[in-house]
Amino acid sequence: APDISVDAVQKDLKELQSVAEANGGNRAHGEPGFKASIDFLKKKLDDAGFKTEVQEFDHGGATGYNLVADWPGGGSADETVMVGSHLDSVGSGAGINDNGSGSAGVLETALAVSAEKLEPKKHLRFAWWGAEEQGLVGSQHYVDSLSQDEVKNISAYLNFDMIGSPNAGYFVYDDDAAVQKVFTDWFKSKDIKTETSAEVGGRSDHASFAAAGVTVGGTFTGAGDTMTEEQAKQWDGQAGEPYDKCYHSECDDVSNINEKALDLNSDAIAHAVWELSS
Ligand code: PHE
Ligand code: CA
Ligand code: ZN
Ligand code: ZN
Ligand code: ZN
């Protein structure tokens, strides 16, 4: 897999920050900053040759949007690897770590697929969800829109929600042992020890897929929970401090990012996509 440029990921985060600033300070469901975020990503994916679709849904009296991007190269859709991130923020801020980080890491991986004109054995589909912060609403709406066959055709769904937490932990979802190993082996090769996280559970969009019987996985750098002494030693972090002190706060802006964690996790996304789709 290619090395994803962390500078490119950071540039996307700056653009998402600008989108928030131009739209009242957030990118939340039902607010103009969310739709502007969808439009920003869609343009990049269209220009890169993806077949994109915006799926609309209603929630809480507002229109929500999911952006789905299919890569036309490679295998047929009866074996599909899906990669997704929620693109909405909470109302209190720009949502750069939660979840500009995952959204940008997935975007740059998709753009790398295009740059390499990848022809994987499996079909690749990327997605950016709306209204995650309202209770996984967009991803659940998407899963509900699939037929039973379409659900069965998803060989794996990979989820990335918060991958640049300033006091970063290196967590890998433990839902599926084989997918988990793809990530843990990769981090091991970079001399990073990973852990599972009690904080993950069903708290992000992978849960919508897992509940439908889809194999899921992903990575996470931690939210509001506190880093332990052991973890701080292992990951060169701050013991007794939250992984993300700006979680769901106004200060979740471009300064709220650990660039090393963002870089490693973005590269890990690309690695997993290449490995699981080949
Ligand atoms: N889904 C949570 C949020 O967006 C954060 C989270 C991410 C929790 C990943 C668990 C795993 O606020
Ligand atoms: Ca990189
Ligand atoms: Zn609803
Ligand atoms: Zn959140
Ligand atoms: Zn989130």
Image (cartoon, helix red, strand yellow):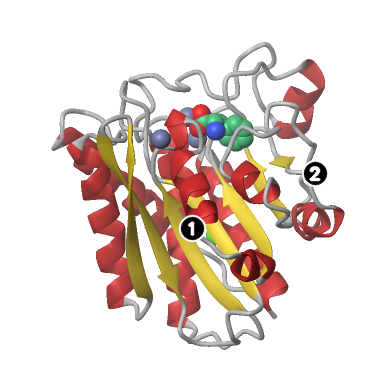
* Left or right: where 38 falls relative to 79: left
Relative height, residue 90 to residue 263 (above, below): above
Q: What element carries label 2?
A: loop
Q: Mark 2 points at which residue?
A: 174
* Left or right: where 177 falls relative to 13: right
Question: Image quadrant of ligand 2?
Answer: bottom right
Where residue 196 sits, quadrant-wise, is top right
The single residue placed furthest to the front in the displayed view is 147
Closer to the chain start, of discs 2 and 1, is 1
The single residue placed furthest to the right in the displayed view is 177
Which residue does the image show at 79% across and 50% down from the upper left? 191
Give me the disc on residue 145. Answer: 1
Provide residue 160's location: percent of width, then percent of height: 57, 47
* Left or right: where 265 falls relative to 213: left
* Left or right: where 168 falls relative to 139: right
**In the depicted view, which residue is nearer to us: 68 or 112?**
68
As shown in the figure, which amino acid type bears the numbered disc 2?
Asp
Q: Nearer the viewer, mark 2 or mark 1?
A: 1
Local crowd at mark 1 within 10 Å, few (<14), some, or many (≥20)? Answer: few
Local crowd at mark 2 within 10 Å, few (<14), some, or many (≥20)? Answer: some
